[in-house]
Image (cartoon, rainbow, N blue to C red):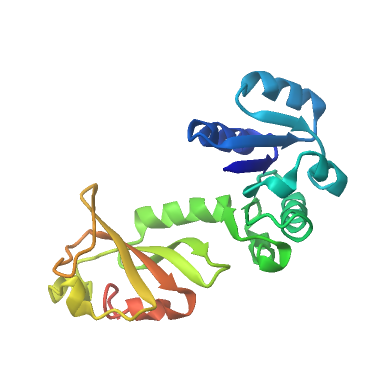
Amino acid sequence: MKIVIAGGGSVGVAIAQDLVERHHMVTLLEQRSDFADRLRTQLPSVTVVNCDACEVNQLQQVGLRDADVVIAATGDDEDNLVVSWLSKQEFGVPRVIARVNNKRNEWLFDESWGVDVYVSTPALITSLVDEAVEIGAMVSLMDLAHGKMKLAEVTLGPDSPAVTNQWTLDELRLPDAVRVVAVIRATQPLVPQDSMRFLEEDHVVLLVRSDATEILTGTFIKP
């Protein structure tokens, strides 16, 4: 795939390196000319372009219309929103991913600004902290489908109904709004099976409709 990344900071560089190793064609846009020169040496397999990713004419010159994915990865939320909007509205890029630097700005990163998926670094760090200390509670890992779905995790405590009742996955009778994606047991990832029974300290990874999280209470979470 042809992927364009806006922002040559540490985040953009790390993403570019990873994507090149996965055999994608990567173009990295960096506004500061001295940084762009340095990145050309540091990233020989990446096309580094010195340009302002918030300017339509400069995006035209880098061929943004041919991109499969645009990643707005600058350290400025306003810039990331502008890049996202231009990518989607002006160039019709199929998939736009944006970085959120300030958690207070998350609500802006939706389809009205051209964002298909946003990644909030502060929210992710908070989730990882919650994951380490929260047992018997849902921890939101990521919003999907413009916030309509959540990727979430529940670490089962000894009083989890699924544990105390020794229910199998089939016996939980989960509605369509909830899907068990994986179960991590003692560092071993398990593929969910209808006959699977749940144990204390299981990490249950779920795909949940955002308006249906209360369903987890009474199944994985004690009421």
In the image, residue 211 lies at what x, y percent? 48, 80
In the image, residue 54 lies at what x, y percent? 81, 47
| Residue 95 drawn above or below residue 14 | below
- Please tell me which residue is depicted at 60% across the width and 38% down the height of the picture: 11
Among all residues in the image, which is located at the extreme front?
66
Image side of residue 56 versus residue 113, left or right: right
In front: 195, or 188?
Answer: 195
In the image, residue 19 lies at what x, y percent? 53, 37
Quadrant, the C terminus: bottom left
Image side of residue 218 versus residue 151, left or right: left
- Please tell me which residue is depicted at 36% across the width and 53% down the height of the picture: 132
In the image, residue 176 lies at what x, y percent? 36, 79
Quarter holding residue 14? top right
Image side of residue 186 versus residue 1, left or right: left
Quarter holding residue 20? top right
What is the number of callouts on the image? 0
| Residue 54 drawn above or below residue 193 | above
Quadrant, the N terminus: top right
Quarter holding residue 190? bottom left
| Residue 2 drawn above or below residue 214 | above
- Please tell me which residue is depicted at 67% across the width and 35% down the height of the picture: 27
| Residue 177 drawn above or below residue 3 | below
In front: 37, or 104?
Answer: 37
- Please tell me which residue is depicted at 77% across the width and 50% down the height of the picture: 79
